[in-house]
Image: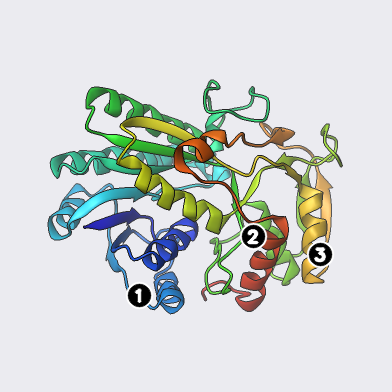
Amino acid sequence: MSLLITGGTGYIGSHTVVELLEQGDDVVIVDNLVNSSTKSLDRVEQITGKKSVFIEADICDKGAMRRVFNDHNISSVIHFAGLKAVGESTQIPLHYYHNNVSGTVALLEVMTEFNVKNIVFSSSATVYGENNVSPLVETMPTSATNPYGQSKLMVEHVLFDLAKSDPEWSIISLRYFNPIGAHKSGLIGENPNGIPNNLLPFVSQVAVGRLKELQVFGDDYDTVDGTGVRDYIHVVDLAKAHLKAVIALDKLPGCTAINIGTGNGTSVLQIVNKFKEISGADIPYKISPRRPGDIATVFAQANIAYDVLGWQAERGLDDMIADTWRWQSENPNGFD
């Protein structure tokens, strides 16, 4: 039996594939390579000494997905494939809804045809919207302020409805907070196309001279230093949460939403200062106005992850920053 990993050549997907291969799982990766590179596959093999099956295909292409399920004995799916840039989603919302929502529905329809009814979904803390107060708990009301967040929330609605309609489904929706870091080998890490959308890749590219300076959006929030506070989690800890979730599917029918975070908040300037301390690099930045929809403080309550999955974050901020810097300094142009 094999695990199907959609979006398995991307940032979180590739780190999860490493962990799966190292624990002896057979892995089939499907990716359309829109936001990733097959070079990550070579790096994963270099780390693990093992090959995975790779198929270049789009989850929206039901014919291609049927061939995947027909040719491989798939037991469960970890579904990473999706577009993830908040700003871009506001400019091309239909593309996001088609890829993230329609693509997931197409995947679920093919899974149903082949009677594969176990799936771990890559969701996001963006589904908590703007009005909940941290720590964020899975029972809080959900909402979204942009098409990317809406697409994640819409897929969660689809998954909950599907599980209600058919008790054979076992679904876990992992609500990530802010993944950062890289594999300790320095061989794989976050490799964004163009200008990074997330803080750490932006900071690290400033540190290696690819970008001139960091923009800090707002320094007048009610936080420790006026800058936004977020719950940062090491990508390897996040990857390990998926391994725990796959195991839990066998004993957890229905659809369950689970936060994946550390339960601690760190400000933008705390990240910048820690990065300067660990890397020895200068990180010039300028303060810009707040962005619409940004919240002062966002962090998780991760009790359900511990109680249900037996998972908790193990790596601290120093590890997250050091591993990010190792990846970026040894690969200043990413995989290129």
Q: Foreground mark, 2 or 3?
A: 3
Q: Position of residue 158 (x, y in %)?
A: 33, 29
Q: Position of residue 232 (x, y in %)?
A: 65, 48
Whether residue 103 is visible: no
| Residue receiving disc 2 | 201
Quick one: 52 or 143, which is closer to the camera?
A: 52
CA gap, disc 1 and disc 2 = 28 Å
| Residue receiving disc 1 | 50
Q: Foreground mark, 1 or 2?
A: 1
Tag 1's secondary structure?
Answer: loop
Residue located at (45% from left, 42% from top): 309
Type of amino acid under label 1:
Lys
CA gap, disc 1 and disc 3 = 36 Å
CA gap, disc 2 and disc 3 = 14 Å
**Could you tell me if the residues under marks 2 and 3 are in contact, i.e. CB atoms within 8 Å?**
no
Tag 2's secondary structure?
Answer: helix
Q: Foreground mark, 1 or 3?
A: 1
Q: Earlier in the sequence, mark 2 or mark 3?
A: 2
Q: Is residue 292 left or right of residue 272?
A: left
